[in-house]
Amino acid sequence: MSASMDAAITARPLDEDKNAQDKKKASARSAKVRNGFEITVLSAPAIIVFVFFVIVPIILGAYYGLYKWKGFGSPSTTGTFVGLQNYITALKDPTFQSAIGHTFLVLIGSLILQGPLSILFALLLNQKFKGRALIRTLIFVPYVVSEVIVGTGWSLLLQKAGAINALLEKMHLAGIDWIANPKYAIWTLLVIITWKYIGFAVILMLAGMQSIPEELYEAAKVDGAGFWQMQKDITLPLLAPTIRIWAFLSMIGSLQLFDLVYIIWGQYVADTAGVSTMATYMVREGRIAGNYGYGSAVALIMFIISLIVALTYQHFVLNRDLDGALTDAKSEKKRKKKLMKEQQMAKEAIAIADSEVK
């Protein structure tokens, strides 16, 4: 009788622990389901917008690219099915190949020019001096001005009889054909792009610098570090994630460049001047030439090129900014599992010890 009572008493704590664990697991599962439902509900509007305004247009563009189509009615009724011929023609077209080369030249040139300049301007604006707010505004204003206004203004300045050449003539220097001459056109475009978009880069770099703890600089000063040494050893390493994000945004913007080139150089001068981009080629050959099927094929090729660049950059560069967060999350999850296992083992040991005492 006493032996059976002792066994029942010993089994009771184990059953209670098991029930408590089952309740915890059920609660964790319900919380996980609830969190998943909340995430789905909150993400649904963004997913719907993404599908209808990104995925669907890409699918339709790929479909239109299979036809020789003038843009009226349905491609299957008013167009001629040509299969992959539009894509093959675009890839073999020397003009489109040149446009791809110009686009990547702008991409690389923008990174080389805007990167160092934006860091230098941000270092300047990160110091305390009178007129800092005014300089910050002057640097950022071109970024918020419409591309149409910027393009029109620069086209007037860069004409053969424009203000820049007039100033050169007053200095007894020969005027330059900034727009049509291939030797100068690409550099002119890079200067305009840098002037237009460097304000955005400066604001990003400045925000990154102001997030760096001031204690690090104070400790470096105590150790005898100079200004440039502190920038090299503290600012640049901690600013690296911001630089990588800005570089990614700059590359995507360069691949989509259209407005400034089209406004300043026009649809035909851009080719002869050596500044045509994939977007200007797409608009000229698609919309202006009235071959919307061919333009859709070029648009899909642009999308694929941009996607490859974005995924490659993300894989080799941006992932290092996510590795820390992912590693911390995984290690925290492992730590919790290990702690739960240790607690379970401790409870079982206590239960066994109690049973032996009784």
Image: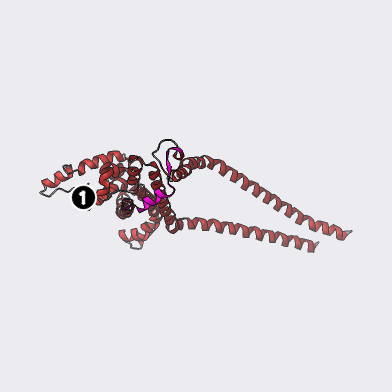
Q: Main secondary structure of the magenta part?
A: helix
User: Dot 1 corresponds to which residue?
Assistant: 181
Rendered image quadrant of residue 12: bottom right
Q: Nearer the viewer, residue 329 or 20?
A: 329
Where residue 209 appears, as percent x and y from the top left, is 37, 52
> What range is drawn magenta here?
77-95
Q: Is residue 253 magenta?
A: no
Q: Nearer the viewer, residue 125 or 243?
A: 243
Where residue 188 appears, as percent x and y from the top left, is 24, 49
Q: Nearer the viewer, residue 247 or 85?
A: 85
Q: Residue furthest left?
A: 172
Q: Is residue 335 left or right of residue 241?
A: right
Q: Is residue 88 magenta?
A: yes
Where residue 274 appears, as percent x and y from the top left, is 26, 51
Q: Is residue 121 left or right of residue 57?
A: left
* Quadrant where the image shows the C terminus: bottom right
Where residue 19 appears, as percent x and y from the top left, is 73, 52
Asked whether residue 218 is in view, the answer is no
Q: How many marks?
A: 1
Amino acid under disc 1: Asn
Residue at horizontal 34 percent and vertical 60 percent from the top: 232
Dot 1, crowdedness within 10 Å: few (<14), some or many (≥20)? some
Q: Secondary structure at mark 1?
A: loop
Asked whether residue 293 is in view, the answer is yes
* Quadrant where the image shows the N terminus: bottom right
Q: Residue furthest top?
A: 73
Residue at horizontal 28 percent and vertical 41 percent from the top: 263
Picture colour scheme: secondary structure
Q: Nearer the viewer, residue 308 or 358?
A: 308
Rendered image quadrant of residue 116: bottom left
